[in-house]
Image (cartoon, helix red, strand yellow):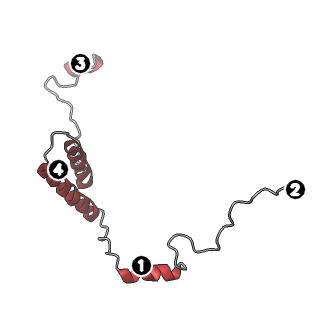
Amino acid sequence: MSEANATASLGVPFSVNHQPRIALRRKSPYSQALELQDLLMKDAREATLKPVSRAIVARAWRELEQLKREIKMKPKPKPATLDEIEKAKRRKGGDYGFSGPRRPGPVEPPVDG
């Protein structure tokens, strides 16, 4: 019996000096940004963090949010102007959330008497 067959039957790699290959995948930039944000969140929750350091963490968080948006190829949000808010009010009948007829109030039970 050859040496290769003998070691294979024992569950040992074919070569004595053989090391199994480990497939290392490179993480995507988006997942790297998410990991950095997790680290920033852990740092921001520390009770001993000074206000200046907390501001630096918040600024880094904002930069990572912008980076994530750019990676996903989403455009920057457009700033709302007062003209757009007034148009929305007129379109919805002066109310922001409800444009249909008003619901009736609670029904009172009939009074026997």
For image coordinates 58% across by 74% down, the residue present is 99
CA–CA distance in space, label 4 to label 3: 59 Å
Instruction: Please name the residue that numbered disc 3 is placed on.
Output: 7
Q: Which residue is mark 4?
A: 54
Q: Amino acid at mark 4?
A: Arg
- From the viewer's perspective, tell me whether residue 68 is left or right of residue 112: left
What is the residue that sits farthest to the right in this orientation? 113
Between disc 3 and disc 1, the foreground one is: 1
CA separation in Å, label 4 and label 1: 34 Å
The residues tagged by marks 2 and 1 sit, at their Cα atoms, a distance apart of: 52 Å
Q: Judge whether 99 appears above or below 38 on screen.
A: below
**Mark nearer the N terminus (3 vs 2):** 3
Secondary structure beneath dot 1 equals helix
Nearer the N terminus, badge 4 or badge 1?
A: 4
Labels 3 and 1: the sequence-earlier one: 3
Mark 4 or mark 3: name the one nearer the start of the chain.
3
Q: Secondary structure at mark 4?
A: helix
Viewer-closest of 1 and 52:
52
| Residues at discs 2 and 4 in contact (Cβ within 8 Å) | no
Give the labeled residue for mark 2.
113
Which residue is disc 1 drawn over? 85
Residue type, numbered disc 2: Gly
Query: Which mark lies nearer to you, 4 or 3?
Result: 4
